[in-house]
Amino acid sequence: MSSNYHEEEILGKAYDGRLMKRLLIYLKPYSGLVALSVIILLISSLAQLAAPYLTKIAIDKYIMAGDSEGLFRIMLFLIGTMAFAVTLEYFQRYLMQYIGQRAMYDLRMQIFSHVQHLDLKFFNKNPVGRILTRITSDVQVLNEMFTAGVIEIFGDIFMILGIIAAMLVINWKLALVVFSVLPLLVLTTVIFRKKVRQSFRDVRLTTARLNAFTQENLTGISVVQSFTAEERVFAGYDGINIELKKAHLRTVFYFAVFFPIVEIIGAFSLALIVGYGGGQILGGALTLGALVAFIQYADRFYRPIRDLSEKYNILQAAMASSERIFKLLDTNTGIELPSQPAKIEGLKGSIEFRDLSFGYEDNNFVLNDINLDIKAGEKIAVVGATGSGKTTLISLLCRFYEYNRGDILIDGISLKKINEKELRKNIALVLQDVFLFTGDINRNIRLGSEEISLEDVKRAACEIGADRFISRLDKTYEYQLTERGANLSVGQRQLIAFARALAFNPAILILDEATSSVDTETEILIQKALRKLLANRTSIVIAHRLSTIRDVDRIVVMHKSRIREVGAHEELMKAKGIYYRLYQLQYKDQEALIANEQLRR
C-alpha cells in the first residue's frame, strides 16, 4: 500500500488560533444560541458547586443542632438545586448538539459545492477516498469538537476555578494540603497525553490503511478470484488488521493505566483531607460539615481534569482535521472564471481550436499547437494511437482543465468568456466508461433535470434503441439500478448513456470511445441510430475502432500530441499516411466481423 496516501495524517498543534478563528465563523450564524448555551453551562456549574456547600450547611447548622425542620427544608432545596442543574445540563447538551449539527451541515455543503467546481486535474492528483474523508470523517471530528469541546472546556475550567475558590473560602490551609497532589496529577496527565496522542495517530493511520486495502481488493474482487489470490490478499488484510488490533490495545492500555492512577491520586488526596481535616476538627479549627464539603469538592475536582485530558485529544484531532479541510477549501478551482460571462443563447455549435497547447504537468505538453475549425453541424472524427491527445482535446473543450496557451472558441466566443455551466448545458459527452447512478433508469437519463419530462426520456431511449431492453425490464423506466448500473450489461449501460446525452438535446455531441465496449450487434444498432441523430448537430467522435466513423464529414488524425492529417476517408487512404496504417491494422478485420454477423442474421 502506498504510504504517501496517508502522509497527511501528521500530528499538529493542539491549538492553532488561526484555524480556530476560521472554525468559529461556522458558529457565527448561531452566535445567539452559543451565548445561551454558555450562560446555561455557567448556571449549571454554579448549581453543581452549590451542592457541597449546601451539605455543609445541612450538617453544621441543622444536623448538629438537631433541627429536623431546617434539615427537611435544606434537603428539599438541595434536591431542587440538583434537579435544576441536571435539567440545565440536558438543555445545554441538546443545544450544543443542535448547533454543532447545523454548523457541520453548512460546512459539508460548502465542501461538497467547492469540490464539484474543482477541475479534473485536482481529482487526478487526489484519491477519491481522501476527498470522501474530508467530507465525512474530518467534518465529524469537528462536530465532536463543537458539541463536546469548545464550550464544555469553558465549563470544565470554570468548575475547577469554582472548586478552588470554594475550598479556599471554607479553609485555605486544608485547601493547600489538597492542592499539594496537583504536581503529581499534572505529571501523570502530561505523560498520558503524550502516549495516547501517538496511539490515537497509529489507530487513525492503520484504520485508513485497512479501509484502503479493503476497498481496493473488493473493487478488484474479480481479478483476485480469477488469479486465485484470495489467500495472499487475506494474508495482507490479516497483517494490517493485527496492526490495528495492537494500536487499539495500546490505547486501551494507556486509558486503563491513566484513570486508575487518577483515582489513586484522588484517594491519596482524600486521605490527606480526612487526616489533616480530622485533626483540625479535633482541635476545633474545622467543622464536620466543612470536612464533608471538602470531600465532595475533591471528588468533583478530578472530574473536569479527566475531561480536559480527553478534550485535549478532541481539540488536537479537530485542529488536524480543520487544517486538511481548509487546505481543500483553499484549493483554487483551476478554471479561470469570467467576470462578465458572454451570453450564448441559441448556440449554433461552430468550434475553433486556435494554437492550443496544454500539459497536465507544466513542462510536459500533451497537446501542441492544435489548429482546427469545425463548422456548425459538421461531424468530425478524431483518431490516433493511445496517448496522442484525443481525450485531452475534448476535455479542454468541456472546460474540465485550463489550457496553457492558445484558445478555444465556440461561435467565435472564447471559452474563457463563457460561464462553464452555460457551456456544458450545450455539450453532451458520452464516455467509454459509462457511469450510472444508483436509482431508476428515468433518473439516470434525466439526471434530476426538471426541464426533461418522462416523455422526453422515452423519446430519447426510443430513438437510440434503448427502449427495446427497457420495455422488457420490471417496471421499465422505474427499474432500479444497482451501484454503477452493475445489473445491466455493458451494452445496455452504453445505450442508457446515449439516451441521457440525447435527452438533453445538446448543440454539440461528443462520443469518446463510446462504442468500444459493446458487442457487434449492439454497435450495429447504435450506428443506425447515430446516422439519424447526429444530423444537424455538431459532433465529435473519438474512437480507436474505425468502424464508428464511416459517416463523418472529416477525420482528424492525431499523433504525438499534434494534428498530423485532416480529410475525408478516401483522401486519407490515398495519402497512405498514419490513417492508412491504422485502417490496415484494424478496419478490414472489423468490417469482416460485422459483415459475417449480418450474414448470420
Image: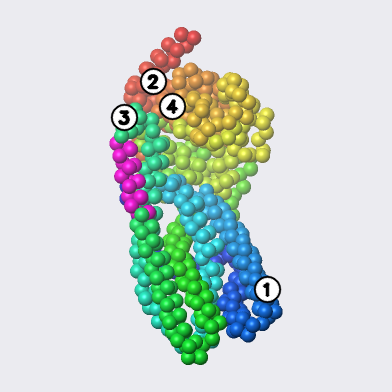
Decide whether the magenta segment is chiefly helix, strand or loop: helix
Determine which quarter of the picture holds residue 260: bottom left
Question: Is residue 141 visible from the viewing direction of this image?
Answer: yes
How many residues crowd mark 1 within 10 Å: few (<14), some (14–19), many (20+)?
Answer: few
Magenta segment range? 232-248
Residue 446 at what x, y percent from top left?
Answer: 61, 35
In terms of sequence position, does the residue under pointer 2 or pointer 3 come before the other?
Answer: 3
Q: Which residue is mark 1?
A: 76
Label 4 amino acid? Ser
Q: Disc 3 marks which amino acid?
A: Thr
The reply to whether the C-beta atoms of the residues labelled 1 and 4 are less than 8 Å apart is: no
- Disc 4 crowd, CA 10 A, few/some/many (<14, 14-19, 20+): some
Q: Which badge, 1 or 2, is on the more N-terminal residue?
A: 1
At x 34%, y 57%, the residue is: 250
The residue indicated by pointer 2 is 587
Element under label 4? loop
Residue 353 in sight here: no
